[in-house]
Image (cartoon, rainbow, N blue to C red):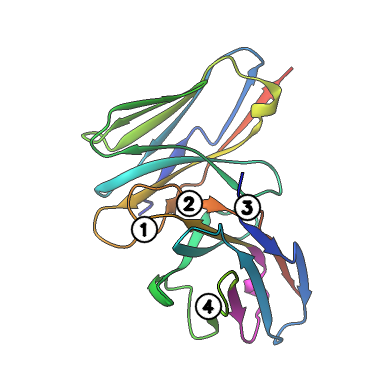
Amino acid sequence: SQQGEEDPQALSIQEGENATMNCSYKTSINNLQWYRQNSGRGLVHLILIRSNEREKHSGRLRVTLDTSKKSSSLLITASRAADTASYFCATVVVQGAQKLVFGQGTRLTINP
Amino acid sequence: EPEVTQTPSHQVTQMGQEVILRCVPISNHLYFYWYRQILGQKVEFLVSFYNNEISEKSEIFDDQFSVERPDGSNFTLKIRSTKLEDSAMYFCASSEQVRNQPQHFGDGTRLSIL
């Protein structure tokens, strides 16, 4: 079974619109993190939300976490062409070391 | 802003040869990781390293793989006898603490096995 699964797999919107990506997971977690990956580049950390937090903001990013539903969402407001990238959620399980378990990612395309 | 650096950016190797991928983590970080991403697939954890020893490894990290921190700055991943299926992007990451801290990734080494 997959620990982190993003939905949708691909999303294409117009510049200025909001983009929402969802992530579901299966086991209890210590925290959940969102990363961005531009094509051919490394992963850039965006935001970390702890299991006892429900919502977190960072600039144009808003992340929610619902541990009862084992799901998280990433909202990017007022999207820009530079936001075009793949977005991954990654979970850190409660019991164990701090390895990140990544989902398949959402490929976000912002059309100018 | 401090960053994780990886070298080389691209490595082409014949099957059966040994490769060493190098990483310089952020200087005050204590926890180090290797991940890989096969083309079109998700990023997979390989190994974590703390206090000069492996703290966790995945099923992928078999006897062909080893990690080392040969000095105070470098962190290396060695693949002893490469296979075609080792072709992937290999990412190094580091974190300051182990709990509730982001991991900072390098730009990766693209390993191509011929």
Q: Mark 3 points at which residue?
A: B40
Instruction: Tell me the element at label 1.
Output: loop
Q: Mark 1 points at which residue?
A: A98
Going from N to C along the chain, the mark reached first, 3 or 4, is: 3
Amino acid type shown at disc 3: Gly
Confirm or deny contact between disc 3 and disc 4 (CB under 8 A).
Answer: no
From this view, report whether residue A59 is shown above or below residue B13. Answer: above
Confirm or deny contact between disc 2 and disc 1 (CB under 8 A).
Answer: yes
Q: Nearer the viewer, residue A65 or B22?
A: B22
Q: Name the residue under label 2.
A: B103
Q: In which quarter of the image is the C terminus of chain A?
A: top right
Amino acid type shown at disc 2: Gln
Chain assignment, label 2: B
Chain assignment, label 3: B
Chain assignment, label 4: B
Instruction: Tell me the element at label 4.
Output: strand
**Same chain? Circles 1 and 3:** no
- Which residue range is magenta in the image? B76-89
Q: Name the residue under label 4.
A: B67
Q: In this view, does B28 lie to the left or right of B19?
A: left
Confirm or deny contact between disc 1 and disc 3 (CB under 8 A).
Answer: no
Chain assignment, label 1: A
Amino acid type shown at disc 4: Val
